Structures are given as structure tokens and as C-alpha cells.
Image (spheres, helix red, strand yellow):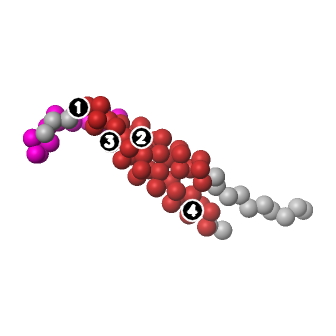
Amino acid sequence: MPPTRRRRPNFVAFIATGAILGFVVGSAYAYLGGSQDTTEYGRSFSDSSAVVFLGLLGACVLGLAAAVLAVLLERRD
């Protein structure tokens, strides 16, 4: 019987998938979440800037979570 080969996760694929999903979720939240037109300081912002900012925030958060998941999957026996 051949020796069993240990499979390792592809880190780039995990992080890219997490970042893409995070951008989609963050953008959808900003677009559909009924964001207010003014902040608590009284300054206004456009819907497109909210979509970009929350999309990038979601991409960073879920990309980091996907990286942690990939490391945990690699470490398990």
C-alpha cells in the first residue's frame, strides 16, 4: 500500500475566496442595508462610497478569517 499523502490547503485560494465573499457581503449590506445619508457628524456620503468602504472592510475581515481557517486545517492531523 502506498504511503498516505497529506493534503494541504491552498492558502491563496482560501484567502481570495474569503476576500471575494467578504466584498460581496459588505457591498450588499451597504447597498441594501438602508444606510443613512449623513453621519453622526453631519457630513454626507454617497451610496457608492459606502459600498466601496464596507466592501473593502468585508474583504479584509473575511479574507483574514479564511486565512485563519486555512492555517487551522493545515495544523490538524
Mark 1 sits on what residue? Answer: 46
Q: Nearer the viewer, mark 1 or mark 2?
A: 1
Residue 58 lies, with reference to residue 27, above or below; the image says below
Residue 20 on image: x %, y %: 48, 41
Residue depicted at 67% across the width and 58% down the height: 8
Q: Is residue 34 magenta?
A: yes
- Give the residues drawn in magenta, as a range: 28-42
Q: Nearer the viewer, mark 3 or mark 4?
A: 3
Question: Residue 39 or 5: which is nearer the viewer?
Answer: 39
Toward the right, the furthest residue is 1
In space, the residues marked 3 and 4 are separated at their CA atoms by 27 Å
Disc 4 marks a residue whose amino acid type is Val
In space, the residues marked 3 and 2 are separated at their CA atoms by 9 Å
Tag 2–tag 4 contact (CB < 8 Å): no
Pointer 1 or 4: first along the chain: 1
Disc 2 marks a residue whose amino acid type is Phe
Mark 2 sits on what residue? Answer: 23
Q: Residues within 10 Å of mark 4 (few under 14, many from 20)?
A: some
Pointer 1 or 3: first along the chain: 1
Residue 66 on image: x %, y %: 50, 53
Pointer 1 or 2: first along the chain: 2
Q: Is residue 32 visible?
A: no
Callout 4: helix, strand or loop? Answer: helix
Q: Is residue 34 visible?
A: yes
Callout 1: helix, strand or loop? Answer: loop
Q: Nearer the viewer, mark 1 or mark 4?
A: 1
Quadrant containing the C terminus is: bottom right
Residue 26 on image: x %, y %: 36, 41
Disc 3 marks a residue whose amino acid type is Phe
